[in-house]
Amino acid sequence: MTGGNVDEVSNADMMSDMKTFTVRDLDRSPGSVLKAAEADGAVLVCCRDGRAYRISPERSNPKPGRAPDFAAWRKQSGMPRLNRTQTAAVDRRIAGE
């Protein structure tokens, strides 16, 4: 390809199915731009001077992973189950008493 500088990332984004918005769209209806980013994974916001910005939602982990099965681990490792008196003594040592 001949001509000026080619920004491969920007051109690839423009040629993909990624939804494209203008800065004006972002200013006037940010909710619709963010909803599109959430639905599609990312959107492109283009400026008049040719700059483009990708907006993508940050993925948080809403569901924490499963907690380990401590009872099974204790049995597998051969540790005896502590009674209430022993548990209270361990708690006092942890607390520094």
Image (spheres, rainbow, N blue to C red):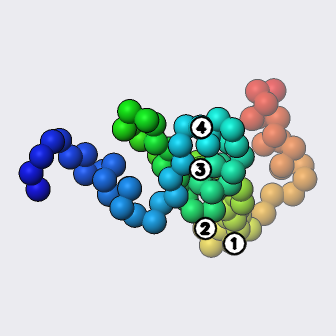
- What residue is pinned by disc 1? 72
- Determine the CA span between mark 2 and mark 1: 9 Å
For marks 3 and 1 on the same chain, the one whose residue lies earlier in the sequence: 3
Which of discs 2 and 1 lies nearer the camera? The answer is 1
Which of discs 3 and 1 lies nearer the camera? The answer is 3
What amino acid type should be assigned to the residue bearing mark 4?
A: Arg
Quadrant containing the C terminus is top right
Please name the residue shown 58% across and 48% down the image: 58
What amino acid type should be assigned to the residue bearing mark 1?
A: Ala
Quadrant containing the N terminus is bottom left
Q: Are marks 3 and 2 in contact (CB under 8 Å)?
A: no
Residue 38 screen position, x and y as percent: 63, 56
- What residue is pinned by disc 4? 24
Residue 28's place in the image compared with 78, above or below, is above
> Could you tell me which secondary element the residue under label 3 belongs to?
loop
> Could you tell me which secondary element the residue under label 4 belongs to?
helix
Is 73 on the left-hand or right-hand side of 8? right
What amino acid type should be assigned to the residue bearing mark 2?
A: Ser
Residue 57 tag number: 3
- Determine the CA span between mark 3 and mark 4: 20 Å
For marks 3 and 2 on the same chain, the one whose residue lies earlier in the sequence: 3
Residue 24 screen position, x and y as percent: 59, 37
What amino acid type should be assigned to the residue bearing mark 3?
A: Pro
Q: Residues within 10 Å of mark 2 (few under 14, many from 20)?
A: few
For marks 4 and 2 on the same chain, the one whose residue lies earlier in the sequence: 4
- Determine the CA span between mark 3 and mark 2: 43 Å
Q: Residue furthest right?
A: 84
- Determine the CA span between mark 3 and mark 1: 38 Å
For marks 4 and 1 on the same chain, the one whose residue lies earlier in the sequence: 4
Residue 7 tag number: none
